[in-house]
Image (spheres, rainbow, N blue to C red):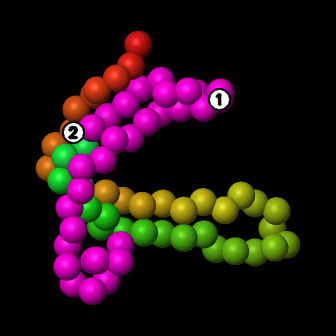
Amino acid sequence: MNTLRIGELERRDLIIHLLNPEHESVLSWRVRSAWPSRLAGPELDAMSGTVAFEAMEVVYEGVRVVGGP
């Protein structure tokens, strides 16, 4: 996100792991030439008692499954 803010798009290869409740990898994807296109943060309200989530939208040029059952 920092390079995007200064006007330089930096693409990277990523590996995304889906984890089970024991934090073990169940399924993995290799994402080619990815870059963030949107970042959304939570609305913080100490009185609400809700869980705060962040979301990042990623654009990529290719994806394939690299691990799983």
Q: Residue 40: horizontal and vertical position, in percent?
A: 48, 69
In the image, is residue 25 part of the stretch drawn in magenta? yes
The residue lying at 28 percent from left, 77 percent from top is: 3
User: Does 42 appear above or below 53?
Assistant: below
Q: Residue placed farthest to the top in the image?
A: 69
**Mark drawn on residue 63:** 2
Closer to the camera in the image, 59 or 30: 30
Taking the image as drawn, is residue 69 in sight?
yes
Q: Residue 35: horizontal and vertical position, in percent?
A: 26, 62
Question: What residue does disc 1 label?
Answer: 21
Q: Residue placed farthest to the left in the image?
A: 61
**Which callout, 1 or 2, points at the residue further toward the start of the chain?**
1
Relative placement, left or right, of 10 versus 26 is: left
**Mark drawn on residue 34:** none
Say what amino acid the circle numbered 1 marks: Pro
Q: CA distance from mark 1 to mark 2?
A: 25 Å
Q: Residue 23: horizontal and vertical position, in percent?
A: 60, 32
Which image quarter: residue 11?
bottom left
Which image quarter: residue 29?
top left
Q: Residues within 10 Å of mark 2 (few under 14, many from 20)?
A: some
Query: Which stretch appears magenta?
Result: 1-30
Q: Residues within 10 Å of mark 1 (few under 14, many from 20)?
A: few
Which image quarter: residue 8?
bottom left
Say what amino acid the circle numbered 2 marks: Val
Picture quarter with the N terminus: bottom left
The residue lying at 28 percent from left, 28 percent from top is: 65
What secondary structure is marked by label 2?
A: strand
Q: Residue 69: horizontal and vertical position, in percent?
A: 41, 13
In the image, is residue 64 part of the stretch drawn in magenta? no
